[in-house]
Image (cartoon, helix red, strand yellow):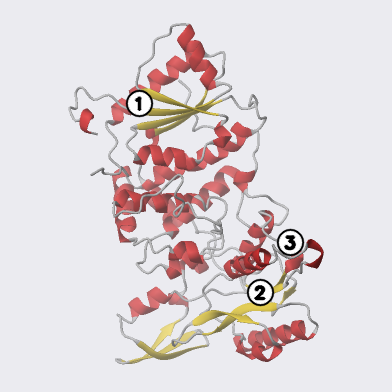
Amino acid sequence: MVENIEIKLRDEAKRLFSEKRVDVIIGYETGTLPLTATPCFITSPEETAKLVFNELCTQNLAKYVHDFITNHKNSQKRVKPEDRKKKVIGVVARGCTTRSLVLHLQERQYDRDEVHIIGVPCEGYLDRKRLEKTLQGEEILDGNVENGQINVRTAAGDKTLSRADLLADNCRACRFNNPVISDIIIGSPAPAMNPDNEYEKINEFEKKSLAERWAHFTKEMGKCIRCYACRQACPSCYCPTCFAEQSQPQWVGIGDDESDTQVFQCMRLFHMVGRCVDCGSCVSVCTTGVDLRNYLKKEEKDCWELFGSRAGSSLEDMPPLGKYDEHDKQDFIYNP
Amino acid sequence: MAENLEKEKWEPKIVAIVCNWCTYAGADLAGISRIQYPPNVRIIRVPCTGRINPFYIVKALQEGADGVLVSGCHPGECHYISGNLVARRKFAALKSFLNYIGIEGDRTIFTWVSASEGDRFAQVIRGVTAKVKALGPAEKMIKQIG
């Protein structure tokens, strides 16, 4: 099944190059470490054999699409307007990646004809941190995924693990595992995941006392070393100058005061209201395992309950904070 | 804050971010009508509530404000037609989010006061001051100086 998708994907990529429809294709290739996949940029038909798509592909490629187009546009600034060239980027996109692309299009970051979306149905990816935890820190020497089983070879011996146990949290509760928009879809639609109880953990957390919630926040943000990997990986974080690096005004101090880290995280998370597509990229790149999803999912829940909007679910819609409705709930307004 | 250490004498410091067209004029009216209200608020005037970056609120809390009040024109009366409606969405999400991370809901208060409501402005300030006083000094997410 997976092999089949990969073959079709490579054929399609080759065809796009031979028809000169795209300048570059952003996809996944096998990583240098066992049981990993890494983003790759393909510029010629020969290279298309590198393309893979499986449950090891974690990162949201929309980030690279945005970076690539922005860099290209910047490089064209000194070219005469009539000589400017558009580049078309092909991107291998699963559900969450297409949602990020929709978000970029809604926010007028580039035009629809600058991206060629090769949609792939997705059945979730593996949570690397959970895999490492299951192996109790044993180094992974080799491994492969077959028929829903993960075969891992470590120094302590061989192990077979179930794929379903190791799926990332966001994939388990994924609502959009099939592409939202695409120019072509490879393979048949993937079966639905389990989105019905997606807010289960959030509802539980909401019931905790204020002190408990604050204790959780300070504990989690205490882990953060402010490497900004979450920001670098996030497709919705594309400001040319991030507030964390702005110096006039300096929003966030650069010292070791823990409130600065809390404020940085608080504001980066708040920038994701109505913009987080729950792709899990930030969670998977976090070096210290901060529980970011707890907060991002809460914002998604608020957005759905208050404004009836899910980020990047439709091209016709606008991001919820970019529009308004006269009849929005205002029970939070203080009225003496 | 050092000057607030004595608990009995403690008075909250509240940052009030108000819009130029309604609430600021309302505060002005309260002043010229000589209506008394607690002196705990520090008013910051902005062109419109839609102009308020949520960062202003979080930053005020980090810098030691015990409470933040945001007030603008009533819905439908915005000088810029829809500024306060856009702001309303932002604040609904912000208030819910700050409460979720564990900051007391009464530290961030949003309301509408129009230019003719000097009396209401004084009432709001009295109410907000009482609410923040009941919570006590802010201790969360505060930057330690020195």
The percent position of residue A226, horizontal first and vertical second, equals 37, 60
User: Which amino acid type is marked by label 1?
Assistant: Lys
Q: Nearer the viewer, residue A316 or A247?
A: A247
From the top left corner, tell me how far across and down residue A279 is, in percent: 53, 65
Q: Would residue A321 be seen by someone viewing this image from the given angle?
A: yes
Residue A289, placed above or below residue A162? above
At x 37%, y 34%, the residue is B107
Count residues near mark 2 (Cα–Cα under 10 Å), then give few for <14, some for 14-19, many for 20+: many
Q: Quadrant of the N terminus of chain B?
A: top left
Q: Nearer the viewer, mark 1 or mark 2?
A: 2
Q: Which mark is on residue B131?
A: 1
Secondary element under disc 1, as helix, strand or loop, is: helix
Q: State which chain disc 3 sits on.
A: A
Say the numbered circle drawn on residue A50.
none
Residue annotated with mark 3: A111
Query: Amino acid type of disc 2?
Result: Val
